[in-house]
Image (cartoon, rainbow, N blue to C red):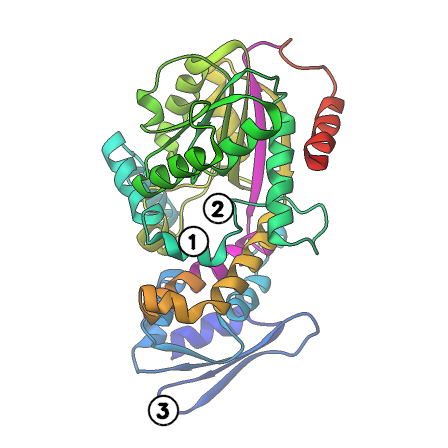
């Protein structure tokens, strides 16, 4: 217990963490403070304290999944929020290894895991997106938008915020009827169908997920627009053609840093001379970093969250012009809290689909992601690109006008 006592004693100052070890001894860290949760946990065996202290994020996640870290007061969302709120990114807080050698080894190992050939990319996508489709129905909105929503009011429903996200993105694409649009990483087809409906454009959506492809095609058929909204199972690197607009929402996180320049080079080759591209991605505030071990192992193998500098730098050799950048700081935190709430409410159904260990893994993932956006270094970036400096109006007014029109239907 000495190692974890020192770790928690240094970290937990605001809010309280009561830890009961396997012998029943109680250790208390921190002090009550308004706005900070009070959490009580119990360790089920003699080794779990060392197991967590040596690799806090992965160790805590696996101990919680395996029932060795038991929460007796509060929940996993509260526990992770307490830890992360005591080391906020904005004030220099850091939970990762500090030694330069350990940081270098972690970075190198992460880059090797992000090489992401076409075959590896498809396997990585299947790991997450080809889960039982009923799982996503239980916590996503009806349109199955599995990316950051856009909250014009934090009190808005998930459905409203996801509809507003689609309008926000569509407005930045400066669409005209009859244009050809490419949706890279189209998910279950919601964005492609929306753009066709509100802007009268033809859309090709591409994915590497068999399950997403099947549902997206079914939705296009049901809407009677399969001739104008098509979906294909293909890697972006293998696609040819010319498109007036390219949109990519929540896919860039799976590209991997070694492939960033390839991604932008191929997007430029697909974009018409007067074309416009909108990239919506989770981003890292500050300098480049590395993907944590829990996410790599259990959630998004091969994934990497880019710093804004990495996005811009990778686009420069292709001479894509950055025409607009927006940072969404808290929108994903609001989104994730609603996903977490729905997941907890549907615990019985999720455990029936998988088991209790999977449910604990999924809630740890959602809770950790929420804390990363509320207290850590994560945000969302929307970056607009063009090949031609004259392709768009010289002020941003057109975005507000179009967004208002889309929201009003």
Depth check: give the residue in front, 347 or 67.
347
Q: Quadrant of residue 357?
A: bottom left
Asked whether disc 2 touches disc 1, contact meaning CB atoms under 8 Å apart, the reply is yes
Q: Which badge, 2 or 1, is on the more N-terminal residue?
A: 1
Task: From the image, state whether disc 3 or disc 2 is nearer to you.
Answer: 2
Residue lying at 29% horizontally and 36% vertically, measured from the top left: 121
Where is residue 56 shown, x and y percent of the image? 40, 64
Q: Is residue 368 magenta?
A: yes
- Under circle 1, the secondary element is helix
- The part of the chain drawn in magenta is 365-389
Where is residue 249 shown, x and y percent of the image? 50, 35
- Under circle 2, the secondary element is loop
Which residue, given by chain and number where applicable, does mark 3 sit on? 23
Which residue, given by chain and number where applicable, does mark 2 sit on? 146
Cα–Cα gap, marks 1 and 3: 40 Å
Q: Label 2: few (<14), some or many (≥20) within 10 Å?
A: some
Where is residue 104 shown, x and y percent of the image? 36, 44
Q: Which badge, 3 or 2, is on the more N-terminal residue?
A: 3
């Amino acid at each position: 217990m000495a190692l974890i006592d020192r770790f928690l004693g240094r970290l937990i100052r605001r809010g309280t963490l009561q830890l009961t070890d396997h012998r029943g001894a109680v250790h208390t860290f921190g002090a009550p403070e308004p706005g900070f949760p009070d959490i009580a946990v119990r360790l089920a065996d003699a080794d779990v304290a060392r197991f967590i202290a040596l690799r806090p994020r992965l160790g805590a996640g696996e101990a919680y999944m395996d029932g060795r870290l038991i929460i007796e007061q509060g929940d996993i969302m509260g526990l992770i929020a307490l830890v992360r709120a005591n080391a906020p990114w904005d004030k220099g807080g850091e939970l990762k290894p500090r030694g330069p050698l350990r940081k270098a080894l972690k970075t190198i190992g992460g880059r090797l895991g992000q090489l992401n050939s076409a075959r590896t990319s498809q396997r990585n996508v299947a790991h997450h997106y080809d889960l039982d489709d009923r799982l996503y129905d239980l916590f996503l909105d009806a349109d199955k938008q599995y990316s950051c929503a856009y909250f014009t009011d934090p009190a808005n429903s998930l459905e409203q915020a996801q509809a507003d996200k689609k309008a926000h993105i569509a407005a930045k694409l400066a669409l005209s009827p009859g244009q050809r649009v490419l949706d890279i990483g189209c998910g279950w087809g919601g964005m492609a169908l929306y753009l066709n409906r509100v802007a009268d454009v033809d859309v090709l959506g591409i994915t590497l997920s068999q399950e997403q492809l099947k549902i997206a095609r079914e939705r296009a058929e049901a809407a009677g627009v399969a001739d104008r909204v098509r979906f294909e199972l293909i890697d972006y690197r293998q696609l040819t053609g010319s498109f007036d607009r390219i949109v990519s929402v929540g896919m860039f996180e799976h590209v991997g840093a070694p492939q960033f320049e390839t991604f932008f080079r191929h997007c430029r080759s697909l974009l018409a001379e007067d074309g416009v591209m909108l990239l919506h991605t989770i981003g890292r505030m500050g300098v480049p970093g590395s993907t944590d071990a829990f996410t790599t192992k259990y959630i998004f193998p091969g994934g990497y969250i880019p710093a804004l500098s990495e996005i811009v730098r990778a686009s420069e050799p292709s001479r894509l012009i950055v025409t607009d950048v927006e940072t969404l700081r808290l929108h994903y935190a609001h989104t994730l809290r609603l996903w977490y709430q729905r997941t907890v409410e549907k615990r019985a159904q999720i455990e029936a689909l998988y088991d209790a260990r999977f449910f604990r893994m999924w809630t740890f993932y959602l809770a950790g992601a929420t804390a990363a956006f509320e207290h850590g270094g994560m945000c969302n970036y929307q970056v607009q690109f063009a090949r031609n400096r004259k392709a768009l109006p010289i002020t941003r007014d057109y975005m507000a006008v179009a967004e208002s029109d889309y929201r009003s239907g």
